[in-house]
Image: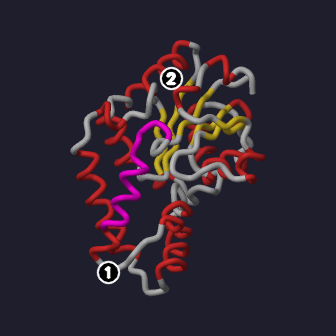
Amino acid sequence: MFSTVIFDVDGTLLDTERIYMKAWRQAGELFGYYIPDEALKQTRAVSSQIAIRTFCKFCGEDFPYREIQKERVRIAEEMIGASTSEQLHKPDVLRVLNDFIKAGYRLAVASSTGSEKTVEHLRRAGLLDRFPVVVGGDMVEQGKPEPDIFLKAAQMSGSAPETCVVIGDTPADVFAGTAAGMKVILIPDQVPASEQTTALSSMILSGLNELTVDLLNRI
């Protein structure tokens, strides 16, 4: 019996993955680097250590990750700040969260983004009050695809890992949730489901609007 639903944020609750990818491209251009789509897809929701290795692989060993990442943050925050709460929402997000709350589930967030930015983005989107537990990437030693962030969310929720379900959009969410001993529902955003993530996921949906309490009870 599940008691807790742990959501990823970017690309799952909020339509921000496209913003981050666009911001990476613009930031890279400012420094004279072309960042291919495959590099962006492989670095969604992963730890900075993995991101650095991946960008260097695709863009060259001299890729100044920290400098470009800082500029990416600035550009992305400007885009997010110019968006309304409705523009940030994934379709049907309010209905989904309210239905789970009414059904008695505990809700938590586990995002690779730092906790301060995660709280800020959820507040801007009008969703923060739905989540008594918010875990950011700066609150754990190892980021996704390691299980730390989901285990931390379960601990803070007072739930055993086996009673938690992860809702995420990236391969990193699938790998981290599975490693944490949790069921995972994958809702791909910028990165399509692969043979591996399909095999590991309990369910794959085409959009958050397909997620219901009844559906969760069937996995």
Amino acid type at mark 2: Val
Image height check: is 138 above or below 28?
A: above
Return the x and y of residue 19 as percentages of the image width and height: 36, 52
| Residue shown at the point (47%, 18%) measured from the top left | 98
Q: Are marks 1 and 2 in contact (CB under 8 Å)?
A: no
Return the x and y of residue 179 as percentages of the image width and height: 72, 50
Return the x and y of residue 23 as percentages of the image width and height: 33, 60
Q: Residues within 10 Å of mark 1 (few under 14, many from 20)?
A: few
Residue 23 inside the magenta-drawn segment: yes
Write down the residue under mark 2: 96
Q: Any mark on residue 32, and which?
A: 1
| Residue shown at the point (56%, 57%) measured from the top left | 143
Q: Is residue 189 left or right of residue 114?
A: right
Query: Principal SS element in the magenta part?
Result: helix
Q: Is residue 78 left or right of residue 34?
A: left
Q: Secondary structure at mark 1?
A: loop
Q: Secondary structure at mark 2?
A: helix
Q: How many marks?
A: 2
Residue 118 inside the magenta-drawn segment: no
Q: Any mark on residue 188, and which?
A: none
Image height check: is 96 above or below 38?
A: above
Q: Nearer the viewer, residue 85 or 22?
A: 22
Quarter that holds the C terminus? top right
Answer with mark 1 or mark 2, whichever residue precedes in sequence.
1
Viewer-nearest of discs 1 and 2: 1
Instruction: Read off the magenta span.
Output: 12-26
CA gap between label 1 and label 2 equals 42 Å
Amino acid type at mark 1: Gly
